[in-house]
Image: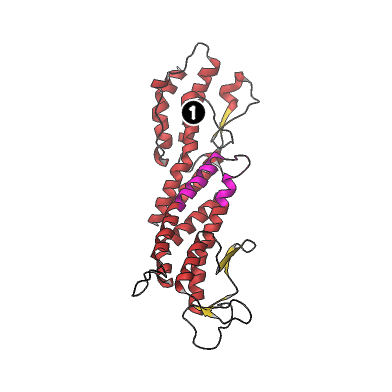
Amino acid sequence: GGGGRAPAGTAPALGWRVEGAGTSPTGISEDGLLRDLLHALQGVDSSCFRFEKAEGRFVVNSSYILSRPAWHLVQHILHLGNLHMRLCTTTTATLEADTGRSLCQQALSEALRDQLRDFYKTLALLMAKISDPVDAKVGPPELTLRRLWTWLQAPLERMQVLVNLSEACVPLRGGALASTVYGCSRVGDLLAQEACQSILRRVLAPLLSMMRAWMTEGELQDPFGEFFVCADASVPLEDLWTRMYSLDIEMVPSFLSLDLARKILLTGKSVNFIRLCCAGQEPLPIASRPGPLLPSPKSAGAGALRRSGSLASAASL
């Protein structure tokens, strides 16, 4: 398990480092091992650990022979580093795509990256706890391998939630993506719930912007087909009311009822009908238009409907 048999003699607690043939093995410094582990958790190779892209995980350098207890603890900690690399790979692929395929996917990736800030702050705090060999104080070290593992329990749980969420949302967009994030926020784990609710607010921002434009202007501002209201451009203008607009059921977020989604469709269609088919109608001045919608899942549709209901009623008359 530790990568080989330790040399004969009294073995140090963590293991040996063998530089090469003909050289004497040296004991592994715990501070040095901790620094290399913290570098791995940030996705950086070190003398002890390197990331194998083919395997998708960090491995121990063959020149390090760890004791069995240290090897097991190191593997548990490196699992967090592997999860971090998976999350970074997913978010980077989305943000660096040649063409934006989904506004909601981009919002999700940006939100996930923001979630990593707390993780990086924790790593910086832990790095500061490693004693400096020059200014080492007399007494037990502030950070040990076991204490590091204890510190990383909460970040590990949170990282697992973020990775599961990001990978579950890879093939999704629009309302379907929002439904998945909403489902992940409905869990008993308070840390996971808080993280997913924060991410959900970011993911809903593009959808709420589309909803506002549809319900107040009668316009579909949906470049990637993510809104649950869709249009058939081949339908002639005289059939606008009966055939041009419809609901994409798969894109209706799970926290919106179909009845409410149909009301949103009807509201925007009414405004759109007045704008395109009724001559002499002027849009509302900017100052009298509804304000921004609140990014709350339960109130998103209802809030938009309340703000736009009077406008739709007046338009349909």
Give the answer, above or below, for where 292 lies relative to 284.
below
In depth, the one of 194 and 135 nearer the eye is: 135
Residue drawn 54% across the image and 53% down it? 88
- Magenta region, residue range: 90-116
Residue 262 appears in view = no
Residue drawn 54% across the image and 62% down it? 82
Q: In which quarter of the image is the N terminus?
A: bottom right
Give the answer, above or below, for where 215 lies relative to 70.
above
Q: Is residue 104 magenta?
A: yes
* Residue that extends furthest to the left in the rendered view of this protein: 139
Give the answer, above or below, for where 173 lies relative to 144.
above
Where residue 99 appears, as percent x and y from the top left, is 62, 39
Q: Residue 312 lies in what quarter of the image?
A: top left
- Is 3 displayed left or right of 194 in the figure? right
According to the picture, the residue beneath numbered tag 1 turns out to be 213
Residue 210 appears in view = yes
* Residue that extends furthest to the bottom in the rendered view of this protein: 9
- Is 80 displayed left or right of 18 in the figure? left
Q: Residue 44 lies in what quarter of the image?
A: bottom right
Which element type, helix, strand or loop, lies under badge 1? Answer: helix
Q: Quadrant of the C terminus?
A: top left
